Image (cartoon, rainbow, N blue to C red):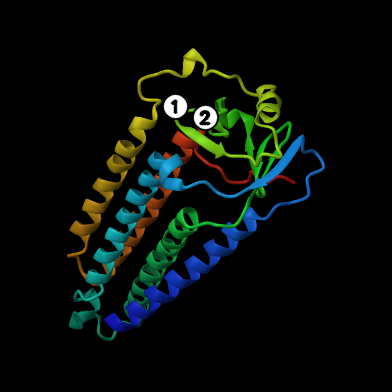
């Protein structure tokens, strides 16, 4: 049976691999591409996340802390006695191989899923490189990511602060994209261009009580807390079962947390496969 130290090493290796993979994807997605269909393009320095996107970053932090809580439970479970300690399975090659696969695969998967969350928060909060924006007929382009117009409900401009805001299609009071273009790019001109695709005010159909930024954080907590509680209940099981269950719960939590963020931020359940050609 693998030792707790071996499992810890596999966890670190999985976390490192996940962090490196996420870093490469994030950096590649921020690189500006040549746009032949751009109606307007500009670059700007990123705005302080805590000041301009407090609800989104708080929800992301709660989600990250929940995954970390499951990770702590898994590391505790790595010291549990395993089913393979039973003398009945001491000479069962199939059971031994299955036990190794479940334990090593589960702890590695937990680490691999934690890595991107650990690297994403610093990249979001501490980002300093300029961000490239473009307006196209299909939507807004941020770096290499296309955000279709249907993901937004309306726009607003703050002439005094020079801020352009595009609001979520699901939560019309939650800004999904916030930009402060340089003075060389007239804010009124940008607003007029975007106004051809988005209204200045949200539709009355979008004003249901649950479609508000104030429910983003409670919804994230409602998703995270039961899963974390189940993980800590499972950590007392035999090592193989405990690690497998916690890895499964971590996968579910990451999946559901991503859906909550996508839904509130853009009104969709997935933001993948929207890279412009």
Judge whether 264 appears above or below 8 on screen: above
For the question of whether residue 1 can be seen, the reply is no
What percent of the width, then of the height, locates residue 97?
37, 79
Does 169 sit left or right of 40 as displayed?
left
Q: Nearer the viewer, residue 125 or 23?
A: 125
Q: What is the number of the mark on residue 173?
A: 1
Tell me, yes or no, whether the two marked residues, 2 and 1, touch with CB atoms within 8 Å: yes
The secondary structure type at the circle numbered 1 is loop
Does 19 sit left or right of 220 as displayed?
right
Which of the image's four quarters has the N terminus?
Answer: bottom left
Judge whether 138 appears above or below 251 on screen: above
Badge 2: residue crowd in 10 Å (few <14, some 14–19, many ≥20): many
Residue at x-position 34% and y-position 83%: 6
Does 178 sit left or right of 100 as displayed?
right
- The residue wearing badge 2 is 167
Earlier-in-chain disc, 2 versus 1: 2
Q: Nearer the viewer, residue 233 or 155?
A: 155
What percent of the width, then of the height, locates residue 108?
40, 71
Name the image quarter holding residue 191: top right
What percent of the width, then of the height, locates residue 152?
56, 29
Name the image quarter holding residue 194: top right
């Amino acid at each position: 049976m693998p030792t707790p130290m071996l499992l810890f090493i596999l966890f670190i290796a999985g976390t490192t691999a996940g962090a490196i993979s996420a870093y490469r994807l994030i950096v590649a997605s921020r690189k500006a591409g040549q746009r032949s269909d751009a109606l307007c393009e500009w670059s700007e320095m990123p705005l302080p996340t805590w000041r301009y996107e407090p609800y989104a970053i708080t929800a992301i932090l709660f989600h990250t802390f929940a995954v970390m809580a499951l990770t702590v439970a898994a590391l505790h479970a790595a010291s549990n006695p395993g089913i393979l300690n039973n003398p009945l399975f001491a000479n069962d090659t199939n059971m031994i191989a299955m036990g190794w696969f479940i334990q090593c695969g589960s702890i590695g998967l937990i680490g691999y899923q934690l890595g991107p969350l650990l690297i994403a928060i610093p990249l979001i909060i501490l980002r300093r490189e300029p961000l490239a924006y473009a307006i196209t007929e299909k939507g807004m382009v941020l770096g290499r990511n296309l955000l279709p117009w249907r993901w937004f409900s309306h726009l607003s401009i703050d002439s005094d602060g020079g801020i352009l805001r595009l609001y979520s299609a699901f939560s019309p009071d939650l800004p999904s994209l916030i930009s402060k273009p340089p003075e060389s790019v007239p804010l009124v001109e940008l607003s007029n261009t975007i106004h051809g695709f988005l209204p200045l005010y949200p539709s009355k159909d979008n004003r249901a009580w649950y479609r508000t930024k104030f429910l983003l954080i409670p919804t994230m907590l409602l998703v995270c807390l039961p899963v974390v509680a189940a993980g800590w209940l499972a950590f007392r099981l035999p090592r193989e079962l405990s690690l497998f269950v916690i890895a499964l719960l971590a996968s579910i939590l990451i999946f559901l947390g991503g859906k909550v963020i996508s839904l509130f931020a853009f009104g969709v359940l997935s933001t993948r496969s929207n890279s412009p050609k």
